[in-house]
């Protein structure tokens, strides 16, 4: 999944993988993350915004670092924007709280929508997807079925 995000960052002319690259890669490669976001026109719109990232509104992101200032600087996140590195760490922490060794795409999806300044949150908003709804769906995804 990170390989796909890195490939998108290079193709887009970005120096770092940001949260929108990670979101795009999740939608492409993780069926559970796609299922959490739901089916229908919102996901199609979301993919449309992500595909158009290198033209139109995505151009204003080129050569800038995604950083809201709301998260502490994360070390060891070479190649990631500060928010993307923080999201990767938060996904691992979510997985650890669930008692598993490795984060899954749904853990990362939850982590991507926690900072309102994240590019992933901006893209979701443009597609009409509410981050709080995503978080609620993530929690339901991990609920044990009776």
Image (cartoon, rainbow, N blue to C red):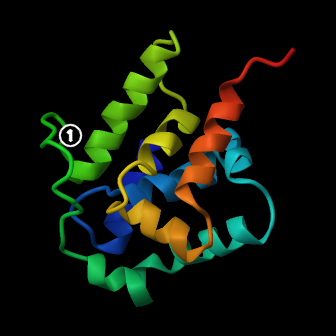
- Front residue of 50/114: it is 114
State left or right for residue 11 relative to residue 144: left
Residue 35 screen position, x and y as percent: 74, 46
Residue extending farthest bottom: 56
All told, the count of numbered labels is 1
Judged from the image, the secondary structure of the residue bearing numbered disc 1 is: loop
- Above or below for 106 versus 54: above
Residue drawn at (24%, 62%) of the image: 66
Q: Note whether residue 113 is visible.
A: yes
Query: Mark 1 — residue?
Result: 77
- Front residue of 86/125: it is 125
Residue 114 screen position, x and y as percent: 41, 48
Q: Note whether residue 102 is visible.
A: no
- Above or below for 36 versus 125: above
Residue extending farthest right: 146
Tell me the crowding category of disc 1: few under 14, some 14 to 19, or many 20 or more residues within 10 angstroms, Cα based.
Answer: some
Residue drawn at (55%, 49%) of the image: 26
């Amino acid at each position: 999944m990170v390989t796909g995000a890195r490939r998108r960052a290079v193709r887009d002319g970005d120096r770092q993988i940001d949260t929108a690259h990670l979101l795009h890669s999740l939608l492409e490669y993780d069926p559970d993350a796609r299922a959490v976001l739901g089916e229908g026109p919102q996901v199609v719109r979301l993919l449309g915004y992500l595909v158009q990232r290198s033209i139109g509104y995505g151009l204003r992101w080129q050569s800038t670092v995604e950083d809201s200032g709301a998260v502490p600087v994360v070390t060891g996140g070479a190649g990631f924007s500060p928010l993307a590195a923080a999201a990767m760490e938060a996904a691992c922490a979510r997985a650890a709280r669930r008692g598993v060794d490795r984060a899954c795409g749904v853990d990362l999806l939850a982590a991507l929508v926690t900072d309102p300044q994240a590019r992933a949150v901006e893209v979701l908003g443009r597609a009409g997807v509410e981050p709080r709804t995503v978080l609620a769906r993530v929690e339901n995804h991990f609920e044990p079925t009776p």
